Image: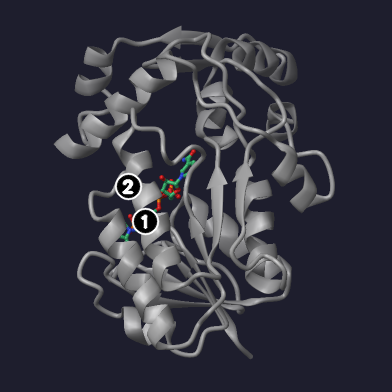
Amino acid sequence: MTEVLVIGAAGKTGRAVTRALVERGVGVRAAVRPGSRSLIYGDRVRAVSVELVTGSGLEAAVAGVSAIYHLAPNVHPDEVLIATRVAESALRQGVSRFAYHSVLHPDDASMPHHLRKAQAERSIRARLESATILRPAAYLQNLEHAARQGRIEVPHSLDAPFTNVDLDDVAVVAARVLTEDGHEGATYDLAGAERMSVRDMAEVATDVLGRHVEAASMSLDDWMTGPGADQSEQARHDLVAMFRSYDHGGLVGDPSALRQMLGREPRTWRDVLA
Ligand SMILES: NC(=O)c1ccc[n+]([C@@H]2O[C@H](COP(=O)([O-])OP(=O)(O)OC[C@H]3O[C@@H](n4cnc5c(N)ncnc54)[C@H](OP(=O)(O)O)[C@@H]3O)[C@@H](O)[C@H]2O)c1
């Protein structure tokens, strides 16, 4: 039976996409970092080692698969190089069904990591015209743990608008484009249908969870010496640019492509928490 190769399969997004494929009865070749101890579930999932920075293991991972889902590790400086290498390997080995996990508004020049995704999209399409591009908004799940802990603290405006998307909805769309005809060359924005600020999300969480959930803002200096301290200097730079961009308009997209791909309303913040 043929398999779909999922790059970055042990991460947050990769796990959701792997699960969605398995739920459709599809075998997954799960590319994980060499030595990764992350557990990947089930009989239908076979882990293969791929070091994305050097490309080691990639050619063997691509051989014989029916489709490839490519995502880059978060704010990775080599995103374009890695995407190009994966697309070239797909081209060499005749794997024409290829989907790339980009981001909503990749051409937004205020965010360096978005621009790298725009460049990666172009590089992939130059090699594989039929590649499908998914452009997800920020995930609702990014704030779920904090909400359950009773305090959502962010280093950007509490009133900026977002149309965050459920990661499992994104994964359902990913599984469809990897297994069905008709998405060749398509680009889909995947935004949730609710426009909410962090303050709104805390209010809904208070209601759904039945206890007070606070929305709090943190200065960028506090973020850099606190939650951001473990990041590389380049990742911190990119994420600070993102928080500043969020201050000027949040991250808002159109939900119609997601609605159409799901054939139902996208899941809401309330659904994720309930
Ligand atoms: N979070 C959001 O709201 C959002 C929204 C839209 C788009 N995105 C994009 O989604 C993508 C995935 O994000 P994520 O949060 O799922 O990332 P993640 O959880 O960090 O997953 C990335 C995976 O890549 C693996 N990896 C890292 N460096 C590697 C290397 N050199 N070689 C091989 N594997 C390596 C990691 O392995 P280990 O498990 O061993 O560390 C991890 O399993 C990013 O490009 C991000 O920009 C995210």
Classify residue 133 by image quadrant: bottom right
Which amino acid lies under the numbered mark 2 shown in the image of this protein?
Arg
- Find residue 120 and name its label: 1
What x and y, as percent, mark residue 9?
A: 46, 63
66 relative to 203 in the view: left or right: left
Graded by Cα atoms within 10 Å as few (under 14), some (14 to 19) or many (20 or more), the crowding at tag 1 reads many
Residue 167: percent from left, percent from top: 60, 45
The picture quadrant where one finds residue 257 is top right
Quadrant of the snapshot with the C terminus: top right
Whether pointer 1 and pointer 2 mark residues with C-beta atoms closer than 8 Å, the reply is yes
How far apart in space, not on screen, are marks 1 and 2 (Cα)?
Answer: 6 Å
Disc 1 Cβ-to-ligand 1 distance below 8 Å:
no
Residue 232 seen = no
Q: Nearer the viewer, residue 109 or 273?
A: 109
Question: In the displayed structure, would residue 169 be above or below residue 154?
Answer: below
Q: Does dot 2 land on a helix, a strand or a loop?
A: helix
Residue behind mark 2? 116
Q: Nearer the viewer, residue 108 or 246?
A: 108
What percent of the width, then of the height, locates residue 73? 35, 53
Q: Quadrant of the N terminus?
A: bottom right
Q: Is residue 175 above or below residue 229?
A: below
Residue at x-position 54% and y-position 46%? 135
Which of 51 and 211 lies nearest the eye of the viewer?
A: 51
Residue at horizontal 27 percent and vertical 15 percent from the top? 220
**Callout 1 amino acid:** Ala
Horizontal relation, residue 218 to residue 13: left or right:
left
Residue at 51 percent across and 13 percent down: it is 160
Q: Secondary structure at mark 1?
A: helix
Image vertical order of residue 59 relative to residue 54, above or below: below
